[in-house]
Amino acid sequence: MLEKYDFIIIGGGVVGSMIARWLSRYEASVLLIEKEADICMGASSANTAIVHAGYDPLPGSLKARMNIVGNPMWDQLSGELSFPFERRGDYVVAVGEEELPGLDTLMEQGKVNGVPGMKMLSKAEVLAREKNINPDVSGALWASTGGICDPFAVTIAAAENAVMNGVKVLLNTSFEDFIMEGTRIVGIKTNRGDFGCRWVINSAGMYSDEIMHKAGIRPEFVIKPRRGEYFVFDRADLTIDNVLFPVPSLKGKGILVTTTLHGNTIIGPNSVFGEEKEDRSTTHEGLEEIWQGAKNLVPCLNQKHIIAMFVGLRPYGNGPCKSPGIDYQHDYIIEIPTEVQGFVNLGGIESPGLTSSPAIAQEVVDLLKDAGEKLKEKKEWDPVRRARPRFRDMSHKERKLLIEKDPRYGRVICRCENVTEGEIAAEIHAPIPATTYDALKRRTWLGTGRCQGGFDMPRVVKIIADELGVSPLEVTKKGQGSNFLLRPTKQVGA
């Protein structure tokens, strides 16, 4: 018998997880499917982790509206879901007098979009606020509502809260096709069987174009992957206090230098179009481009302090802006199309997609209500998801009490990030279990320090195996095909 749901969400990134959390408020059955071994493994997993103020999107675009609506929602969200968020503000820095007009353009654009708390700063004011800034700075646009977050923690918290409120999450579950009755979608086919539903919500990020094409809509819409490369610096060797953007160009926001909630400095990204939607390889040319761009903002950067590099992929689409008189061909798509029934279609959700995610979730709910859905709120809905203990953030007294309750919190497994066995075990048995090394890395930050997992990895593999009751040979880095171990050492040569 076909397992049936009211809503099926395709894609477990930050937008899909926020939608799941929003729908969990109502008396409806909800299924979220994700093709990878964990949530937050696509575009949501590799970005600059910034909550944008909203001066950058083109006025009148859906990007601008979602950014402006989404930004103020983050304070309440972080309180309810217990993820770290700091409203640090951000700077767009002009280097040289010739870049100052670009700041005026952004200021005016921000005013049109409705961004509060913007201010023009002089050279002296910028130098006073960031000790590492290029001394040739000529001024900056300061936006007080900019913020920084941990996109892994945000996505996981939203998805866990959804699960706590009745949503079902299926990992390693790939969408294959729709089940149709005429022009109405009544279910989906997956690699793990068929599921019935009244609505499908396309939140598949990089693959959203392929899914809408299978539904028979928007054949002209194409997602192109935009690759962005990054460097990560050891926090013990370099401290940047602020979020520093350059004056943007036609290629995007530009290569920035920013602090993170974990204390590391990161630089990037560049913007290079590719053909492969899974190509996360770095290039010599790309890394050199971001290095030179970042050095223009912070000349004291030193490559000996780099501990990691990574690539993020942004789902760049060609959705036209719906506002009259605006010729903009790369806007978000958030719609219930008329050509097919039972389908909520999202596409081209790139930056500021992270910032916009709660607003997009609310927009989806509003669209469903406009389409006639009688969404009844649950009396028992709980908006609060409590974070699990983080040993490195505790006082000595708090640590002592925690260790007395569970001695595993007294065994440090990752020395660089001060992550304990107790934390690892707790995440393995969380509402959305972390069953791979990278899933634990996203949740606890183990393996992200100077040694990049060189010390902790063997110990983490053993803990995963012990907690799940499986062989260490079955433990993977990020899912099927990424096993760490092939055989016991004593079998070599046997």
Image (cartoon, rainbow, N blue to C red):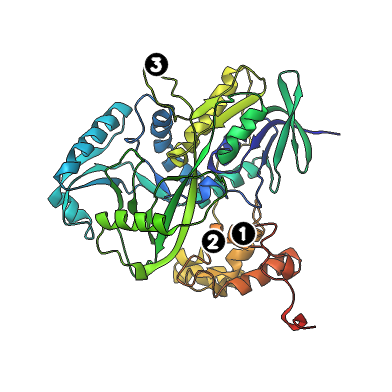
Residue type, label 3: Pro
Q: Residues within 10 Å of mark 1 (few under 14, many from 20)?
A: some
Kindly report the distance in space between the C-alpha atoms of the residues bearing marks 2 and 3: 46 Å
Q: Is tag 2's residue or tag 1's residue first in the polypeptide sequence?
A: 1
Q: Quadrant of residue 190?
A: top right
Q: Identify which amino acid the numbered label 2 is placed on.
A: Thr
Are there few (<14), some (14-19), or many (20+) residues within 10 Å of tag 3?
Answer: few
Q: Secondary structure at mark 2?
A: helix
Q: Which residue is mark 1?
A: 427
Q: Secondary structure at mark 1?
A: helix
Separation (CA) of disc 1 from disc 3: 48 Å
- Seen from the viewer's position, the closer of residues 392 and 361 is 361
Give above or below for 342 relative to 416: above
Place of residue 78 in the rendered image (x, y in percent of width and height, measured from the top left): 46, 46
Q: Earlier in the sequence, mark 1 or mark 3?
A: 3
Above or below for 372 versus 354:
above
Where in the figure is residue 34, as x and y percent of width and height? 65, 44
Between disc 2 and disc 3, whose residue precedes? 3
Q: Which mark is residue 444?
A: 2
Q: Which mark is residue 324?
A: 3
Residue 16 image point, x, y percent? 58, 39
Q: Quadrant of the N terminus?
A: top right
